[in-house]
Image (tube, rainbow, N blue to C red):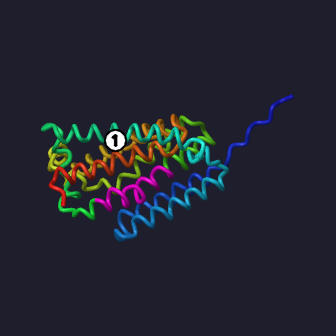
Amino acid sequence: MSVPATRVPPWWPVVAVVGLLTVSNVMTNRVLPSPAYVPWGVAMTVLLLVAARADGCHWVDLGLSRERLAPGAAWGLSVFALVAVVYVIAVSLPMTEGLFEDGRVEGTGTAGALYQAIVRIPFGTVLIEEVAFRGVLLAMVARRLGVAWGVAVSSVLFGLWHVLPSWGIEETNPVLSDTVGDTVIGPAMAVAGAVIGTGVAGVVFCWLRLRSGSLLAPMLLHVATNSVGFLVAWIHLGGG
């Protein structure tokens, strides 16, 4: 007796999710005012989860099962502490302290810095990015092509997600400006570096998500790299 072939789900839900993320990326980077950043990110996160559930993904597929919260927290807090230590060492060394001279941080008051680190970054950036790329897209593509392709596709898209926010980033940091040079292709080089770097980071985040079984682990790593990095740069530049 022949075994019936497993039916592969249609691809249009994946295309719809990518389209939704494209619209969200343009809105947050080019259209919406700053106060709308966090509410928009939370709303988009809810829509993404609804789409994934409608596609047949279970909470465990998305890394959101309660049973995996403890391992996710253990992995996440470990890498959080590791990133914090690396940042403290890096900002203390003459050869790397220039990396923290970020013009986007300079001049931020205490309340503004705390808002960035505790609210805007975790709930406006990390939440939607981890749910979208290490949760929804990883699960939806894995259902169709397997986990390896899920990691690859979600990581490539995560890199492309950073094209708009990284455009002009070389103007905010003297080290980066010196690296790409004052040329016409400088901005393109900076964007290419950001896309490649975040794409590789996406693979690491996916590994952590799969190893721990929980989305909480890459979320905590993401908060560490962004929020702790922001606070270290803020303190390095004199605080408020």
171 relative to 7, above or below: below
Q: Is residue 76 magenta?
A: no
Near-viewer residue (174 or 144)? 174
Kind of residue indicated by mark 1: Gly
The residue most toward the right is 1
Residue at 56 percent across and 61 percent down: it is 47
Residue at 35 percent across and 46 percent down: it is 224
Residue 138 at x, y = what percent? Answer: 54, 44
Which residue was labeled with disc 1?
Answer: 197
The residue most toward the left is 94
Residue at 44 percent across and 67 percent down: it is 39
181 relative to 27, above or below: above
- Asked if residue 40 lies left or right of residue 89, the reply is right
- Asked if residue 180 lies left or right of residue 57, the reply is left
Residue 122 at x, y = what percent? Answer: 40, 55
Residue at 37 percent across and 60 percent down: it is 120
The secondary structure type at the circle numbered 1 is: helix
Q: Is residue 123 magenta?
A: yes
Residue 191 at x, y = what percent? Answer: 30, 49
Residue 195 at x, y = what percent? Answer: 35, 46
Q: Quadrant of the C terminus?
A: bottom left
Q: Main secondary structure of the magenta part?
A: helix
Q: Quadrant of the N terminus?
A: top right
Residue stretch rendered in magenta on the structure: 114-132
